[in-house]
């Protein structure tokens, strides 16, 4: 028996709210450890004009539709919401979900979102600088809210930039998400360990999550051997929960 967690990311594109709700209810009944959406305003693949839904509104419905899994956005774009507002939204979701909300966050990258919704896209270094400034503000606001979060409300940072992003993970995060294959994950994880050592953090205090495609679930052992704690299957509609179930059985 392993302690490996299994989650699913449901892509809120080219689908309907009814299909998303059915999928997250089924995933929760399947007792996955986590259920996620992504935080974008337009499809990331396929028909660029396909249906698409906003992350945090979906998470509010997911919070009250589920009873087992942790929920969150993999990951929230820091640019789209004021840090204090994001902290308050996260705290409220944590109450709706009974203390099982995770704030996944990243610097942002999808230029169409920025252009169409009027955000300043700027540069990658600039967006990382903004994320670095936002993280302490989020933590500070979480400490001031009345009432505070129900649960621990962990912060997970998504990204793999070795000079800045992984340093921010070491300094601020309870979890870190990246992608495979195993060799890529292992190399990035080693850099994170080095940053943890530099900032005086126990590397084991950071949960390592890896997002994988349904077709890659059979490669789970390599990721676990490389240090992954939590495997998240990314799927669009029709949502492939059979692959998730296979992974759950494999790691059990």
Image (tube, helix red, strand yellow):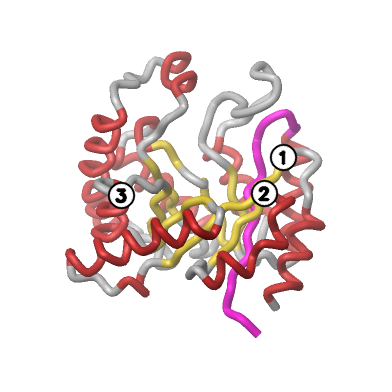
User: Which contiguous range is marked in magenta?
Assistant: 1-16
* Marks 2 & 3, CB-CB < 8 Å contact: no
Residue 27 shown in magenta:
no
Count neighbours of disc 2 (C-alpha within 10 A) and say few if under 14, some if 14 to 19, many if 20 or more: some
In the image, residue 214 lies at what x, y percent? 72, 51
In the image, residue 99 lies at what x, y percent? 49, 64
- For the residues labelled 2 and 3, the Cα–Cα distance comes to 24 Å
Where on the picture, by quarter, is residue 171?
bottom left
From the viewer's perspective, tell me whether residue 150 is left or right of residue 214: left
Query: Mark 3 = which residue?
Result: 162
Residue nearer the viewer, 69 or 232: 232
Q: Residue at x 52, y 40 (%)?
A: 56
From the viewer's perspective, tell me whether residue 47 is left or right of residue 224: right
Q: Which dot, 2 or 1, sits closer to the camera?
A: 2
* Marks 3 & 1, CB-CB < 8 Å contact: no
Name above or below for residue 45 compared with residue 164. above
Query: Mark 2 = which residue?
Result: 213
Query: Mark 1 = which residue?
Result: 236
Q: Residue at x 66, y 45 (%)?
A: 10
Q: Earlier in the sequence, mark 3 or mark 1?
A: 3
In the image, residue 43 lies at what x, y percent? 62, 26
């Amino acid at each position: 028996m392993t302690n490996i967690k299994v989650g699913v990311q449901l892509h809120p594109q080219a689908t309907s709210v009814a299909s998303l709700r059915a999928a997250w209810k089924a995933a929760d009944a399947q007792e996955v450890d986590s259920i996620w959406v992504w935080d974008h305003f337009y499809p990331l693949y396929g028909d660029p004009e396909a249906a698409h839904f906003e992350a945090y509104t979906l998470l509010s419905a997911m919070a009250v539709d589920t009873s087992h899994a942790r929920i969150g956005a993999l990951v929230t774009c820091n640019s789209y919401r004021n840090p204090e507002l994001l902290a308050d939204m996260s705290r409220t979701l944590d109450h709706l979900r009974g203390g099982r909300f995770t704030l996944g966050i990243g610097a942002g990258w999808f230029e169409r979102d920025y252009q169409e919704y009027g955000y300043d896209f700027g540069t990658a270094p600039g967006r990382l600088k903004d994320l670095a400034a936002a993280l302490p503000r989020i933590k500070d606001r979480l400490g001031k809210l009345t009432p505070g979060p129900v649960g621990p409300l962990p912060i997970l940072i998504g990204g793999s930039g070795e000079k800045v992003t992984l340093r921010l993970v070491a300094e601020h995060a309870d979890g870190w998400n990246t992608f495979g294959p195993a060799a890529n994950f292992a190399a990035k994880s080693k850099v994170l360990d080095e940053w943890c050592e530099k900032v005086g953090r126990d590397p084991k205090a950071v949960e390592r999550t890896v997002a994988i495609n349904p077709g890659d679930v059979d490669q789970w052992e390599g990721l676990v051997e490389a240090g992954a704690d939590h495997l998240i299957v990314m799927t669009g509609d029709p949502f492939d929960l059979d692959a998730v179930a296979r992974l759950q059985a494999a790691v059990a």
